[in-house]
Image (cartoon, rainbow, N blue to C red):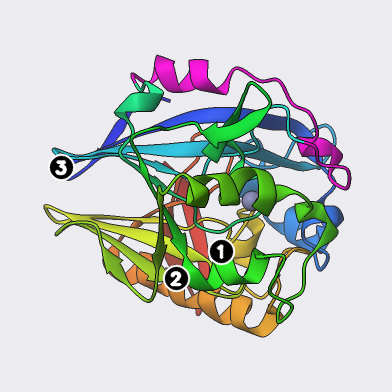
Amino acid sequence: MTARRIGNVNVDIAIEMPIDDGFPPEMLVPDFDPAVLAANRDLLIPFCINANTNGFKLSIHTWILKTEHHTILIDTCNGNHKDRPDFPLSHQLNLPYLEKLAAAGVRPEDVDMVLCTHLHVDHCGWNTRLDNGRWVPTFPNAKYLFSRKEYEQWDPKNTDYPKQPFNTNVFDDSVLPVVEAGRAVLLEGAHAIDDELMIEPAPGHTYGQVVLKVDSRGERALFSGDMMHHAVQILRPEWNSGFCDLPELARETRRKLLEHCVEKNALLLPAHFPPPHAVRVKAAGGNFTFTPE
Ligand SMILES: [Zn+2]
């Protein structure tokens, strides 16, 4: 993908892990009904479903936003050399992610803000890198923005929240070192980065997930994290992923954000859609449909 513009904001992407062959739909979206695929084949294939396997095409990537004043990364994928005993997809990777950022014209020291929409294993891995056996911030000049509620959910000392096995070690190797380096900022409620970029709570997938809205020169966009994982959830917003912590709230938030996209004509840029990685959402008789863009 070549970079695109949303008003004054330049948007590019660094793809850590493309997933083209087809992830078993029921593993990601337990309610998935093949009848929805049968009724929407032309919409879903080849964009987001593999024609040979009928599996989900996905992507694990970082959105790169450049404004006049900032270079911002949204979500930092899995990271290299991380021990993920309960999540093989992310375990001990050695991928050329920093080279992908470089190809988009971004050196680690250029980044002045990192936003993790939430603190799952595939959204904060490159927050840190291994340096002589220690985890250190990958982006030495960046402020790292986390939701305070999200931080509390994953803090091992906090027993008020469930801790899923797939996220084992993530807090200790990808969050805590950033805090200890004095680079973390914990957000409460909505937070304006500037006049055009707004971070807002979007709980449901996790307790403290946030999204980023762009409103610049009449153009709008929504960076939605894991509000949804796959475009079938636009057709069926009631379908949660198997990784959603608060099922009812996840459905409510998904529908509300899809309505926002329709009402404001906001481009939807999730964390895991395959190329072209973004869609325009449209109303369809009380429900939603989309066009890849
Ligand atoms: Zn994710």
- Determine whether, in the image, residue 189 is placed left or right of residue 87: left
Whether disc 1's CB lies below 8 Å from ligand 1 is answered no
**What is the magenta range?**
83-105
Q: Quadrant of the C terminus?
A: top left
| Residue density around tag 2, few if under 14, some if 14–19, many if 20 or more, within 10 Å | some
Residue carrying label 3: 8
Residue, x 49% and y 55% (percent of image)? 290
Q: Earlier in the sequence, mark 1 or mark 2?
A: 1
Give me the C-alpha separation between circle 1 and circle 2: 8 Å
Residue 34 in the image, given as x and y percentages of width and height: 83, 58
**Badge 3, how many Cα within 10 Å: few under 14, some, many 20+?**
some
Q: Residue at x 66, y 40 (%)?
A: 58
Mark 2 and mark 3: span between their CA atoms? 22 Å
Count residues near mark 1 (Cα–Cα under 10 Å), then give few for <14, some for 14-19, many for 20+.
Answer: many
Which residue type does callout 2 highlight? Leu
Disc number for residue 227: 1
Q: Earlier in the sequence, mark 1 or mark 3?
A: 3
